[in-house]
Image (tube, coloured by chain):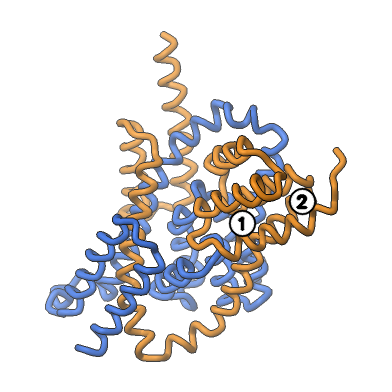
Amino acid sequence: MKHDYKKLWPLFLTFFKIGGFTFGGGYAMIPLIQKETVENKKWITDDDILEIIAIAESTPGPVAINSATFVGYKTCGFLGAVCATLGVVLPSFVIILAISYVLEAFQEIKAVQYAFNGIRAGVLALLVKALWTMYKKSPKGWAAYIVMAVAFVLTAILKVNVLFVIVFCAVFGLITASLVKKEAEK
Amino acid sequence: MIYLELFYTFFMIGAFTFGGGYAMLPLIQEQVAARWSDVISSEAMINFIAVSESTPGPFAVNMATYIGSQMGGVFGSVCATLGVVMPSFIIILIVAQCYEKFKTNRIVKGCMSGLKPAVVGLIGNALVNVFVTIFFPAGFTLAVFKDITLYLYAAIFAAMTVLAFKKVHPILIICISAALGIAIGYLL
């Protein structure tokens, strides 16, 4: 496949902008990606955006990286994927690196410590919201509820390794899905 | 060798997180507690979640950069970030070749039907960890319940949960809880 390598720099810049201006990451980024790459630059189509969401949901890793790599690849091949991914990562990398150096000195201040005491309670609230969002996205039914409960009990109470639980639940899903299918075929 | 450990650990985290964002938290919590708890306390982790929410960019990259820089300076953060990005980069390059087949693949669908609810349970675990760190840092003792600040922070948590479900922006929630935290700190 032949690519127009003049698109590499705009790809990098576009995703740099997207990475630098979305708060909350991941899914918050999708509308911005749609606007920039479909409406403005016409590199990909609306159907591609739907593909990206479907694929990002069934592959591991951050949604932002998945989308950037996919759009970059579709637009300009391997180098396009590299430029788009680098672009989306770079703003947060630079910002966080700078913050990580001042955060410690900053936390010496009494008012900042007080602020973080309150903030931690606020973060807990955000986590409750995240849990609810994930619950809504998850399939329902007895098998799903069992997996939720088992994953929770194994990690929170029995302190089983999280990686192991993830692999275990994937295999469990695979087995129940094929059992349900066999039942339907009967 | 800390750089290799950072790269490897975040590579695993990137490869085993499905659903993005907070789905990564349980894995990061576990790895940090097991490997680097002497440098990064669980309280520092929670503080950083707030920082990550208030700065642009993907949660995963923010986390990797921060932990990498705490453990190994600039090069450490390069290694951790590269690690967390690499698995999705490689997998998407492969999937992009054949995504029609991939989407309808029965094995992928089956695995996802187990992974999606699993993420709910795992985030539940992360939530409990954060809860214990905030309210019971010294363990469950009766003395904790005599401390008035416990109830004040619980009230902040309850109020912010209501705001979060009313779709108030996370940054605003962090700002309000910061202001309340400062007020409590100076008034008591």
Q: Is residue A141 above or below residue B6?
A: above
Left or right: B20, with B87 as reference point: left
Which residue is rendered at x = 41% and y = 21% of the image? Answer: A180
Q: Residues within 10 Å of mark 2 (few under 14, many from 20)?
A: many
Colour in which chain A is shown? orange
Q: Quadrant of the N terminus of chain A?
A: top right
In the rendered structure, which amino acid carries the disc numbered 2? Gly
The foreground one among A135 and A164 is: A135
Q: Position of residue A150 (x, y in %)?
A: 34, 43
Which residue is rendered at x = 36% and y = 91% of the image? Answer: A110
Say which residue label 2 marks.
A80
Mark 1, secondary structure of its residue: helix
Colour in which chain B is shown? blue
Left or right: B152, with A180 as reference point: left
Say which residue label 1 marks.
B11
Which residue is rendered at x = 24% and y = 70% of the image? Answer: B156
> Numbered disc 1: what chain?
B
Q: Is residue A174 above or below residue B91?
A: above
Q: Position of residue B121 (x, y in %)?
A: 36, 47
Q: Nearer the viewer, mark 2 or mark 1?
A: 2
> Numbered disc 2: what chain?
A
In the rendered structure, which amino acid carries the disc numbered 1? Phe
